[in-house]
Image: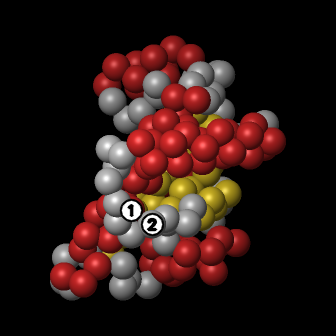
Amino acid sequence: MMQWKNVDIERYREAKTYIDTLFMPLIPFQLSSDDDLGKHAFQSEALMIFLNELEKELSGRVLLTPAYTYLIHTSKDNEIERIGQWVEDIYQQPFEHIFFFTHDAKWKKFEKHLDGSLIWIPGTSSGDIYSEDFVQRIREQVKDMSELIRSYW
């Protein structure tokens, strides 16, 4: 696995000529309204589980960054600018592909402004992440998504 952990970053530095793809989760955050707290927390957790499994599946070519977290009601234009700063820094390394993953469909409207590929994953708003159904659904999504990512290579 190649994640934003000290041991993985050391491995990345040794093998970075082979690791050409970066995954960046886009995670909405908001505490000001109780209405959607559970939904957003669940989707965040589900997305990270999915990306951890996808990164394992594509191990050796992928680095998973820390989540890019943003307030739900902030201007996407401001967030595009901030993400652009992240991407500018990322391209100091030999990455050829950047994939942004999110459950937030509002990003689709701004996709053309991102320097990378946006992948919107429809998500449920609640459930049991430890259930067999959830695990099976993640496995199926990982299988499908790994084929999509490989098509970019």
- For badge 2, the amino acid type reads Thr
- State how many labels appear: 2
1 and 2 marks in contact (CB < 8 Å): yes
Q: Secondary structure at mark 1?
A: helix
- The amino acid type of the residue labelled 1 equals Gln
Rendering coords of residue 114 (x, y %): 62, 65
Q: Residue sitting at 46 percent across and 28 percent down?
A: 2
The image position of residue 143, as x and y in percent, is 65, 39
Q: Secondary structure at mark 2?
A: loop
Q: Mark 1 — residue? A: 43
Q: Residue 5 in the image: x percent, y percent?
A: 33, 30
**147 sits to left or right of 22:** right
**Residue at x 32%, y 44% (from the top left corner):** 130
Q: Is residue 68 above or below residue 66?
A: below
Quarter occupied by the C terminus: top right
126 above or below 64? below
Q: Where is 6 relative to 106, above or below? A: above
* Mark 1 burial class by Cα count in 10 Å: few <14, some 14-19, many 20+: many
Residue 74 sits in quarter: bottom left
Q: Residues within 10 Å of mark 2 (few under 14, many from 20)?
A: few
The answer to whether one can see residue 33 in this image is: yes
Q: Residue at x 40, y 19 (%)?
A: 10
Instruction: Report the residue at 51% width, 14% height from top.
Output: 14
Closer to the chain start, of discs 1 and 2, is 1
Which residue position is annotated with label 2?
A: 124
Corner quadrant of residue 26: bottom left
Q: In the rendered view, does 64 fall on the left or right side of 18?
A: left
Residue 129 coordinates in the image, percent (x, y): 34, 49
Q: Nearer the viewer, residue 144 or 58?
A: 144
Query: Observer-nearest residue: 45 or 127?
Result: 127
Please say if 69 is above or below 12.
below
Mark 1 and mark 2: span between their CA atoms?
Answer: 7 Å
